Amino acid sequence: MSALNMDCEQRGDIDSVFGWIANLCNKETRLWAMLELFERRSNIDSLGLLLWHSFGAVSGLLQEIVTIYPVIYQEIELTAQQSHRICTAIGLIQAMAAHPFIGIQLIRCQFMCYLMPLLKMTSQTRAVEHVRLSVLGVICGLLKSDHPEIVSYFLGTELIPLTLRQLEFGTTMSKVLCAFVLYRTLEHEVGLKFASRRLARRLHLIHTLARVVHQLTLEPEPRVLKHVVRIYSRLADHPQNLELVLKLLPAQIRNGYFCQEVLVGFESASLELADLNRKLSKREEKDKACDDTMPENH
């Protein structure tokens, strides 16, 4: 009897899930359906697949995204209620993006072009920040898949300049996510080549990193520092970047300033900073050797 009751209960839960997904098509019932699905997203197996393959579900979530566009382009203040609603929709999109098959499909169908404009909001209000973090969460989830096609797609957007701005001026959590996004992008060969292609692009990136390091000396944040050090180290893998890094690297990175005590969240700081400095020292030794072998002018 108990097993029968359990089966009936599970069947009822499944029916409820399908009912909420179907209600995403209806503007009147969409908010309630999104809230129910979002609250239970960690307990619903393959929620991303269900949403992706359900008629009208993705379209309903997309309608929620575009309703915020007037806030972006007409500089209307975003309310806490609007923020909560769109963050719920983005949370369900993140459930799709976390699935390896659906993540690449979201890229191929250009779905992310509807989310990218949300990163252009410059306001630092809590309502806007919640939206920003939600979008960055989707991007981080996609980049974790290590699919080069995903990296190539984001290189064709304004993602790098937008994340550099937030890395310098955003809240702590925004900086953490943006630093992660930049590192994961540069980790791929196509991302490193893109960042190294133009002098203006390289200078913008390296100057921004230097200003962030200066901020970190005043307000330490190991989670940001960890990715900043790894970005520097990755940039140093490219010959054109290495020369600029040598010239513009902040003294705090080279003189052991961040190694004076254990950084919770970046316990490997000493090792990773030593590795970066080793790369730079090799280049300096090479340059010195070249200078020594050059004939003197008489």
Image: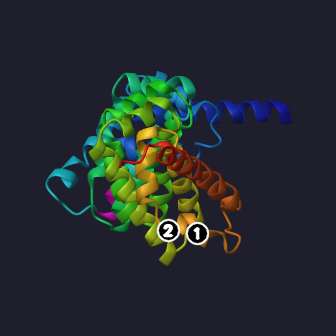
Q: Can residue 88 be seen in this view?
A: no
118 over 102 or under it: above or below: below
How many numbered circles does the render carry?
Answer: 2
Q: What residue type is labelled 2?
A: Ala
Along the line of sight, which residue is nearer the eye, 56 or 94?
Answer: 94
Please tell me whether residue 80 belongs to the stretch shown in magenta.
yes
Tell me if label 2 and label 1 are in contact, CB under 8 Å.
yes
Q: Name the residue under label 2.
A: 251
Residue 255, label in figure: 1
Name the spot of residue 255 as percent of width and height, x first.
58, 69
For badge 1, the amino acid type reads Asn
State the quadrant of the N terminus: top right
From the top left corner, tell me how far across and down residue 107 is, in percent.
40, 27
Determine the residue located farthest toward the bottom in the rendered image.
Answer: 218
In what element is the residue under mark 1? loop
Q: What stretch is highlighted in magenta?
A: 79-84
Q: How is the image coloured?
A: rainbow
